Image (spheres, coloured by chain):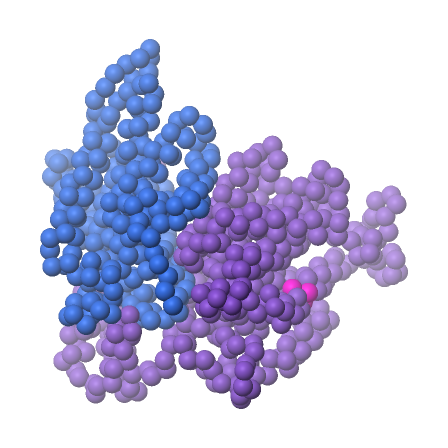
């Protein structure tokens, strides 16, 4: 494998027009083969007979773009020399952010707390910020599993779904409120994590990925088909809203309830509940973060990172890999369950639609994009992934296309993510912040 | 008994398709040790190219079914193989030597990209193809229940057998197959011995994609409808099949595919269709627990 990698780095030759033309021609030919069937023809008329529509101009445009794009890239590469950054090297920005993580974190938290009271805050802004925070929390939860323990979980959304449905069902059947149901939802999600993890955590990384993916699909299929309980594709609605120490957020509270605006003797505003939900998820997310930061310093946290780096060496040191991985899996699942409960209470309506594989992929993309194991990176990545599509609503159609391309692109150019942080948390000889070579 | 026989036929047909896709997973995993998550999308693209080719041949006036089938088969294999090659070149080759999860994440990105690429270019609605091959044979009747095998099912099974023979010959007898087997054992050593590793890996992707294209063509003929989302489920199922048979082993992939197809057919036939996917994944988990290397896989020893 390293043989191939060296071959790529060695291209530092001067710009050779003949060779560049030949390569661009080859690329254009491949592009022609790719575009001819898929772009050149379009299947039209779903009902009755299917017909073909011809779009040769698209193929021509595509091929010409690839040809000149390839020429341009090889020209630029020759001008600047081949990129010499070895895979896995941490960039200067990332290093700066990582060494000053404390200040960035404090500033971020202060900003997050002040957000609803800044002049530009309106319902929409707070709503989007709440969504970002849900993803931040999910990202931090998954970071335990993927970033710290190094287990690839492609079915994280299953635990999110378990949390959401357990709150919705407990509320429906036993009349539990959000605060009573929250710990139950977390415990249930963790139980599912253990049930799944116990048999499969002995497997190798890639197998684990597929089994978790299958598990996510199983949960979704069950939610979709177990109609008497989950109401299948119709979903569960009328999920109760959370209360603020017993105060409800309605204009006219029911008999025996006191509303928030009555208690504080302020006029009613629909914004109160939105802001309350925002602070709620902010606190839940910060709790997750605080927990993760603390547990990283405990023996079990250190064991996760040791396992991630070298399983055999950890075994030799007496770490039980299955149990250690199981704790990571269960804790990650628990935070997913908390986030799911919050999601249910915020939306008031849940259906299996919200818990598809693409959601798992998004959360994973946030963790990977942010740099696995980096807590600040997750925040940055969650903000980018949630806010970018909001900005470009007219690009809705191309959203997922760009999302997929970005995942590939980031892996190719920055395999360690935006803010990679895989430095050992403990060193034998204290040195200035250096970086590990891969 | 007749009901059983009918489910057996359906299961074998389904299994043949899973097996053909599974071979692509298994070969790639055997050589570079990564899950080519985008392989399901390659199968979906194969199905789209097949349907487009059918319509194009119809426009050109080639309507004699055996000739049309052959031409579509060749076109689908060639064009889909280009997709397989391009995916490897763009998304996986730059990542060789990167950290372990990088290619898998890149593959997930590629899978999302290809799905949306097809959705944008071809539209999200379901594409129906009028039946091209009709007719079949009745094998027996039992009190109103007839067991039949359709011509499409016969074609699918025969084609699978033929492809398996060709394929095994390539692996066992040709220089390419020898290079592939060498790469499977040790990439670095193979490169030192003069095997062009990059080219071998590219050709592996091309072969896997060509087989997935055949499966796509079969699905188009068999079900008569396709859409841009079929690759996801088929992809995970085929991977399940590859793991079931022992990943890295080509006869294992076919065996796993057939078993999975049978499990699904019998589950749908005797229990419920809603939970057939749950049954398939359940089998995967059970197999991995008791036989971590699959049915025909070689035990893998992890070394420091």
A349 vs A195, nearest the viewer: A195
Q: Overall secondary structure of the magenta stretch?
A: helix
Residue B179, picture quadrant: bottom left
Q: Is residue A71 left or right of residue A239?
A: left
Looking at the rendering, in which quadrant would you find the C terminus of chain A?
Answer: bottom left
* Residue A381 in picture, x, y percent from top left: 52, 69
Q: Is residue B43 left or right of residue A371?
A: left
B302 vs B122, nearest the viewer: B302
Looking at the rendering, in which quadrant would you find the N terminus of chain A?
Answer: bottom left
The residue located at (86%, 48%) in the rendering is: A257
Count all numbered tags in the image, as a single digit.
0
Chain letter for the blue part: B
Residue A76, picture quadrant: bottom left
* Residue B55 in picture, x, y percent from top left: 21, 43
The residue located at (33%, 16%) in the rendering is: B145
Q: Is residue B232 magenta?
A: no
The residue located at (74%, 60%) in the rendering is: A276
* Residue B275 in picture, x, y percent from top left: 47, 35
- Which residues fall within the magenta stretch? A285-289
Q: Is residue A163 left or right of residue A47?
A: right
Colour in which chain A is drawn: purple
């Amino acid at each position: 494998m390293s043989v191939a990698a060296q071959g790529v780095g060695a291209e530092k030759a001067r710009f050779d027009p003949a060779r560049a033309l030949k390569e661009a021609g080859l690329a254009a030919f491949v592009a022609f083969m790719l575009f001819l069937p898929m772009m050149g023809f379009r299947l039209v008329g779903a009902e009755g007979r299917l017909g073909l529509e011809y779009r040769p101009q698209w193929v021509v445009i595509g091929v010409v773009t690839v040809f000149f794009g390839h020429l341009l890239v090889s020209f630029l590469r020759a001008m600047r020399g081949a990129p010499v950054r070895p895979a896995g090297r941490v960039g200067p920005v990332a290093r700066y952010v990582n060494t000053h993580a404390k200040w960035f974190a404090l500033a971020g938290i202060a900003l997050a707390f002040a957000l609803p009271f800044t002049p530009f805050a309106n319902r929409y802004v707070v709503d989007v910020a709440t969504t970002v925070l849900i993803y931040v929390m999910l990202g931090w939860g998954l970071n335990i599993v993927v970033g710290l323990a190094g287990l690839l979980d492609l079915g994280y959304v299953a635990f999110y779904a378990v949390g959401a449905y357990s709150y919705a069902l407990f509320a429906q059947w036993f009349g539990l409120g959000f605060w009573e149901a929250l710990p139950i939802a977390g415990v249930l999600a963790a139980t599912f994590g253990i049930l799944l993890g116990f048999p499969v955590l002995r497997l190798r990384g890639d197998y684990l990925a597929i089994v978790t993916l299958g598990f996510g699909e199983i949960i979704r299929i069950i939610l979709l088909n177990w109609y008497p309980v989950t109401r299948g594709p119709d979903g569960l609605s009328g999920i109760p809203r959370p209360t603020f120490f017993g105060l409800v957020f309605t204009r006219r509270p029911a008999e025996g309830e006191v509303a928030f605006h009555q208690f504080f003797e302020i006029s009613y505003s629909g914004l109160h509940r939105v802001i309350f939900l925002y602070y709620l998820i902010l606190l839940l997310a910060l709790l997750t973060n605080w927990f993760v930061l603390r547990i990283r310093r405990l023996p079990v946290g250190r064991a996760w990172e040791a396992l991630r780096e070298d399983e055999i060496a950890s075994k030799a040191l007496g770490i039980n890999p299955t149990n250690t991985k199981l704790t990571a899996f269960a804790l990650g699942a628990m935070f997913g369950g908390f986030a799911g409960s919050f999601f249910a209470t915020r939306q008031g309506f849940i259906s299996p639609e919200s818990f598809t594989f693409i959601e798992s992929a998004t959360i994973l993309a946030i963790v990977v994009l942010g740099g696995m194991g980096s807590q600040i990176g997750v925040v940055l990545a969650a903000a980018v992934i949630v806010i970018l599509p909001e900005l470009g609503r007219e690009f809705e159609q191309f959203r997922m296309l760009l999302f997929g391309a970005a995942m590939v692109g980031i892996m190719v150019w920055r395999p360690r993510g935006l803010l990679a942080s895989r430095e050992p948390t403990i060193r034998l000889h204290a040195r200035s912040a250096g970086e590990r070579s891969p | 008994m007749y009901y059983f026989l009918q489910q057996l036929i359906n299961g074998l047909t389904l299994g043949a398709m899973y097996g053909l896709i599974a071979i692509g997973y298994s070969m790639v995993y055997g050589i570079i040790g990564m899950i080519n998550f985008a392989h399901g999308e390659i199968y979906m693209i194969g199905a789209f190219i097949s349907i487009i080719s059918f319509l194009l041949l119809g426009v050109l006036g080639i309507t004699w079914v055996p000739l049309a089938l052959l031409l579509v088969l060749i076109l689908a294999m060639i064009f889909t193989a280009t997709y397989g090659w391009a995916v490897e070149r763009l998304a996986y080759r730059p990542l060789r030597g990167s950290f372990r999860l990088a290619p898998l994440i890149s593959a997930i990105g590629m899978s999302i990209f290809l799905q949306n690429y097809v959705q944008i270019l071809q539209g999200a609605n379901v594409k129906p193809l009028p039946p091209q091959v009709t007719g079949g044979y009745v094998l027996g009747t039992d009190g109103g229940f007839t067991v039949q095998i359709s011509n499409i099912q016969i074609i699918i099974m025969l084609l699978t057998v033929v492809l398996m023979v060709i394929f095994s010959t390539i692996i066992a007898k040709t220089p390419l197959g020898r290079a592939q087997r060498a790469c499977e054992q040790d990439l670095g050593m193979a490169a030192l011995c003069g095997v062009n590793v990059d080219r071998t890996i590219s050709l592996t992707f091309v072969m896997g994609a060509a087989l997935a294209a055949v499966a796509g063509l079969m699905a188009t003929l068999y079900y008569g409808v396709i859409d841009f989302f079929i690759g996801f489920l088929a992809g995970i199922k085929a991977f399940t099949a590859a793991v079931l048979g022992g990943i890295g082993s080509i006869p294992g992939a076919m065996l796993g595919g057939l078993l999975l197809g049978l499990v699904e057919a019998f589950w749908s036939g005797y229990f419920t269709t809603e939970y057939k996917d749950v049954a398939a994944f359940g089998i995967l988990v059970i197999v991995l627990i008791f036989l971590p290397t699959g049915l025909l896989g070689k035990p893998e020893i992890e070394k420091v």
